[in-house]
């Protein structure tokens, strides 16, 4: 069941720490520019580094102006829902606060049903790991509170893994594994050349 207070906090522009399908994430609504900018400040993140965006289904990428090729769709159907974040081209200026001039965004459709249910109520969430940039990702709520204190509206406890998602770029003709993460890189590139 999705917490009504969490949905309300996020839809009002708040920031929360929640368990994702990998690590604890510090999240905000991706369509809320002010919330996304506050997240950059809170994490001390480089202003040129896009955050991963959690979405509830493949089709949601089109909301960000992403036009998928047949090959990209086939790849996404193979890895989503799952612990694979995928970099796709996003050139629309109105999303520059998300792509930070890189002309690309990373998306992930998580597998847990409760997380996708949350995304259906809040829309896409920017979801970097719960830590200051360059620091170790929080493994517990206590660790997350040391990073962010009262600047976060809600802290939601839960079980998390100790590895981030795998990160794959689909900006070129074939998938390129940028970060190994939790998924075997061989399974990400098999049958794609």
Image (tube, rainbow, N blue to C red):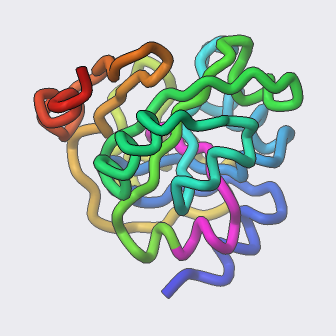
Residue 50 sits in quarter: top right
Quadrant, the C terminus: top left
Outermost residue, front side: 70
Q: Does 43 lie within the magenta span?
A: no
Relative to residue 8, is residue 80 drawn left or right?
left
Relative side of 79 to 1, left or right: left
Query: In this view of the protein, can residue 163 be seen by the observer?
Result: yes
Between 139 and 163, the residue placed more toward the observer is: 163
Which residue appears at 59% of the width and 47% of the height?
149
Q: Quadrant of residue 181?
A: top left
Can see residue 44?
no
Residue 100, x across and y down, in percent: 72, 18
Q: Is residue 128 highlighted in magenta?
A: yes
Residue shown at 45% from the left, 14% from the top = 172
Q: Position of residue 163 (x, y in %)?
A: 23, 39
Decide: is 49 above or below 145.
above
Q: Which residues are magenta?
A: 117-129
Q: Residue at x 69, y 61 (%)?
A: 123
Residue at horizontal 41 percent and vertical 38 percent from the top: 85
The image position of residue 46, as x and y in percent, is 62, 13
Most foreground residue, 125 or 104: 104
């Amino acid at each position: 069941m999705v917490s009504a207070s969490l949905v309300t906090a996020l839809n009002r522009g708040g920031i929360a720490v929640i368990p994702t399908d990998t690590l604890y994430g510090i999240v905000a609504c991706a369509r809320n520019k002010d919330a996304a900018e506050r997240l950059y400040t809170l994490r001390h993140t480089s202003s040129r580094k896009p955050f991963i965006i959690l979405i509830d289904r493949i089709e949601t990428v089109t909301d960000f102006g992403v036009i998928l090729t047949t090959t990209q769709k086939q790849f996404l159907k193979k890895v989503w829902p799952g612990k694979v974040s995928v970099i796709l081209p996003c050139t629309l200026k109105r999303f520059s606060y998300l792509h930070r001039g890189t002309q690309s965004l990373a998306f992930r459709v998580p597998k847990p049903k409760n997380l996708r249910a949350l995304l259906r109520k809040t829309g896409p969430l920017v979801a970097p790991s719960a830590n200051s940039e360059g620091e170790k990702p929080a493994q517990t709520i206590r660790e997350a509170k040391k990073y962010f204190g009262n600047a976060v509206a809600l802290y939601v406890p839960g079980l998390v893994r100790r590895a981030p998602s795998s990160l794959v770029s689909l900006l070129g003709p074939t998938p390129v594994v940028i970060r190994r993460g939790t998924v075997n890189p061989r399974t990400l590139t098999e049958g794609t050349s």
